[in-house]
């Protein structure tokens, strides 16, 4: 089988990029021939994995023909990016022309059996409008639906062409219902597939890292929508001696949001460190040095990092994001390993109602303290076998769909 993967973003930085990369790696082990179209900066390479047999069709940004940074599906990306909401007609034309050239080139020279497009958004719609005689599968990552609901860019064009996809992969049942309702797509064409993690990288050593303090860690974009302001404020108000706890934030942001989060963290009397953007192997090692993972996001698709943290032996505190309970399953939900934070009311998908934030902050503080109490009272690490959530198992589920449709 020959598969062409298409993404508008850098395929090595964000959750959806990791998803694409890991599926490509798993399919390579199965002997599939593969190619990828991806948006990258002019000085970069696609850089999926040098050991793979993978044809690459890069679309370069920050060049004369495409004079702006890579367009990001989130308004805040961990690298310099352009927001879809800021694209003018000239920029849209440049984007369309550049990707059209590479799509047509890849289809003619590589001649795929199936095309897998990441995000149910403009580039996937463009691909469907250009290619009529190939089966196209769209993968929803959640941020695509957020863009569709918050801005008007080519909305009718996107909706019309997404409806014409041959099949769609959703991360969870709530997302499936959202896709079905928003696009008017038949339920039988939408498959709930979940996500995965690399069990060769994220694993537990079997016991906690010996140290005389508790380490809480977050990993993701450094932005408002990740709930980092209430997290830092809650952490700074803990009823715990400041030398007995530390907060580590892994990831990058940019612009005013990033600067404000840095400055508020500096004002805390507790130790709050910024680890920057980490490779998967380095993040896994930081997890194994930590005790608690926290994800106070206001909006996510399915956060891969949550499973990576659980697989590394961490206790997890997470916002009750739609789909997470179903994804992780009863075994995890009924264990001691995970605690949920009720979300504040939201406006415009991921902006919390201001008057709900004090309660959200209070819940963060309470759950951190409750988790520390549990850890101190239970001097063992009650780990779980999560290999059923690995990339290998996810690739097997996708493979079955590819052969069936």
Image: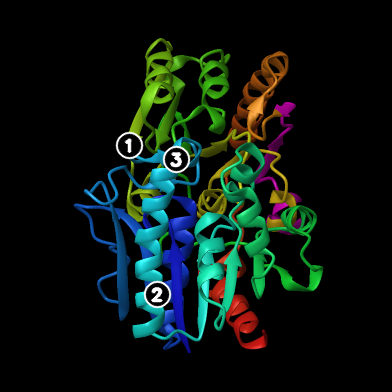
- For mark 1, give the secondary structure: strand
Residue 259 appears in which quarter of the rendering? Answer: top left
**Labels 3 and 1: the sequence-earlier one:** 3
* Residue at numbered disc 1: 276
Depth order, front residue of 121/387: 121
Which span of residues is magenta-colored? 328-346
Q: Looking at the picture, how far across and down is residue 278, in whole percent? A: 33, 46
Task: Note whether residue 160 is visible.
Answer: yes
Could you classify mark 1 by the number of other residues whose Cα lies within 10 Å: few (under 14), some (14-19), or many (20 or more)?
A: some
Q: Looking at the picture, how far across and down is residue 178, in whole percent? A: 76, 52
Left-right relation of 177 to 382:
right
Q: Decide: marks 3, 1 in contact (CB < 8 A)?
A: no
- Mark on residue 87? 3
Left-right relation of 19 to 178:
left
**Labels 2 and 3: the sequence-earlier one:** 3
**Labels 2 and 1: the sequence-earlier one:** 2
* Residue at numbered disc 2: 104
Q: What residue is shown at x 54% (from left), y 16% (from top)? A: 233
């Amino acid at each position: 089988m020959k598969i062409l993967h298409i993404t508008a973003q850098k395929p090595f930085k964000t959750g959806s990029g990791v998803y694409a990369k890991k599926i490509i790696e798993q399919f390579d082990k199965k002997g599939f021939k593969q190619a990828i179209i991806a948006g990258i900066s002019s000085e970069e390479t696609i850089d999926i994995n040098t050991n793979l047999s993978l044809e690459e069709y890069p679309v370069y940004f920050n060049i004369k023909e495409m004079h702006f940074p890579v367009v990001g599906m989130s308004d805040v990306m961990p690298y310099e990016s352009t927001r879809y909401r800021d694209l003018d007609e000239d920029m849209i034309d440049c984007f369309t022309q550049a990707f059209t050239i590479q799509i047509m080139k890849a289809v003619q020279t590589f001649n795929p059996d199936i095309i897998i497009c990441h995000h149910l958004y403009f580039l996937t719609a463009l691909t469907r409008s250009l290619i009529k005689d190939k089966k196209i599968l769209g993968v929803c990552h959640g941020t695509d639906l957020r863009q569709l609901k918050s801005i008007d860019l080519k909305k009718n064009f996107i909706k019309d062409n997404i409806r014409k996809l041959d099949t769609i992969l959703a991360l969870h049942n709530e997302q499936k219902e959202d896709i079905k309702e928003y696009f008017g797509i038949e339920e039988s064409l939408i498959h709930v597939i979940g996500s995965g993690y690399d069990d060769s990288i994220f694993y537990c050593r079997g016991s906690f890292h010996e140290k005389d303090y508790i380490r809480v860690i977050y990993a993701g974009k450094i932005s408002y929508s990740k709930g980092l302001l209430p997290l830092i404020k809650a952490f700074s108000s803990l009823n715990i001696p400041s030398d007995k706890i530390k907060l580590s934030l892994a990831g990058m942001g940019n612009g005013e949001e990033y600067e404000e989060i840095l400055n508020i963290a500096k004002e805390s009397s507790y130790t709050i460190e910024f680890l920057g953007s980490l490779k998967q192997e380095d993040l896994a090692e930081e997890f194994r040095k930590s005790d608690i993972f926290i994800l106070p996001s206001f909006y996510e698709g399915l956060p891969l990092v949550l499973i990576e943290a659980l697989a590394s032996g961490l206790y997890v505190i997470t916002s009750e994001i739609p789909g997470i309970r179903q994804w992780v399953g009863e075994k995890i939900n009924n264990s001691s390993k995970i605690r949920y934070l009720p979300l504040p009311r939201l406006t415009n998908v991921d902006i919390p109602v201001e008057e709900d934030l004090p309660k959200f902050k209070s819940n963060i503080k309470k759950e951190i303290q409750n988790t520390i109490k549990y850890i101190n009272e239970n001097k063992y690490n009650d780990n779980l076998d999560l290999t059923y959530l690995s990339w290998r198992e996810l690739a097997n589920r996708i493979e079955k769909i590819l052969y069936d449709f």
